[in-house]
Amino acid sequence: MRTTLLEQIENYWENRAPGYSEVNQEELQGVQKGQWIAEFRKHLPQDNKKEVKILDIGTGPGFFSIILTEEGYSMTAIDYTSGMLEQARQNAGILAPQIDFMQMDAQNLRFADETFDVIVTRNVTWNLENPERAYSEWHRVLKKGGMMLNFDANWYNHLFDAAKREEYEADRRKVEAAQMEDHYTCTDIDTMEEIARQVPLSPVTRPGWDVDVLSRLGFQSIEVDTEVWDRVLSPVEKMNYASTPVFMIKAVK
């Protein structure tokens, strides 16, 4: 029996959990941790942090939840796969009891309306079967005046655009010449590309699509930062993802 797209996505990330956790561990020990904290401090409330309820959607091995718990915020972390949540708990160590870890679909949240002050998410939206529904759910669970910070990129545009494919291949050659680890091809690239060809956002130019959807959903303020990659990525990441720079969408309900 052919598996559904959601099952394919779940199986891929379940299998990827240990390897992806190693990436998060490197971030927690490297320069990226401080860079991400500095970025969050620009946007998140700095007073009464424990009263600020933050939902980390698609937490993976827990990077955002860990650093924001250290910053003093009240964190809830969700992921669709049990393997990622297991890695997140391990990576959180002594902080784990302070984080509410829950297995949940980002497109069907089991929270009441207006539960959270902030939503943070990274590298999740592109990978969703129904990203517009997800955005609707995220809008629903945010309090009025609440904020979403979504970090993502056009990760697999090159599967649909010849010019982007050339840029992607150039990245691969530069990474090889520099004798760096290739963050694309060191994974199960065939399986990931099969999924990427099926999810709706791979051929879409973003973040323009996101701005349109978020506006229709009723977000009052939407800002896009296409230079955030330069502040938060490591030199290795910058070379790996030169043709797919990370952007940030900040939307206020």
Image (cartoon, rainbow, N blue to C red):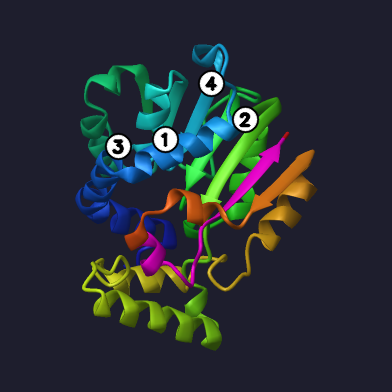
Dot 2: element: helix
Residue at which label 4 appears: 53
Quarter of the rendering occupied by the C terminus: top right
Q: Give yes or no for contact between labels 3 and 2 (Cβ–Cβ under 8 Å).
A: no
Q: 158 or 240: nearer the eye?
A: 240
Does residue 143 appear left or right of residue 231 in this picture? right
**Position above or below: 102 against 175:** above
Does residue 109 appear left or right of residue 177 in this picture? right
Residue at which label 3 appears: 85
Residue at which label 2 appears: 141
Q: Give yes or no for contact between labels 3 and 4 (Cβ–Cβ under 8 Å).
A: no
Callout 3 amino acid = Leu
Residue 239 on the magenta span: yes
Q: Quadrant of residue 175?
A: bottom left
Residue at which label 1 appears: 78
Residue 63: percent from the left, percent from the top?
35, 38
Residue stretch in magenta = 237-252
Q: Residue at x 53, y 69 (%)?
A: 202
Q: Disc 3 versus disc 2: distance between alpha carbons?
A: 21 Å
Q: Earlier in the sequence, mark 3 or mark 1?
A: 1
Q: Disc 2 versus disc 1: distance between alpha carbons?
A: 14 Å
Residue 79: percent from the left, percent from the top?
39, 40
Callout 1 amino acid = Ile
Q: Earlier in the sequence, mark 4 or mark 2?
A: 4
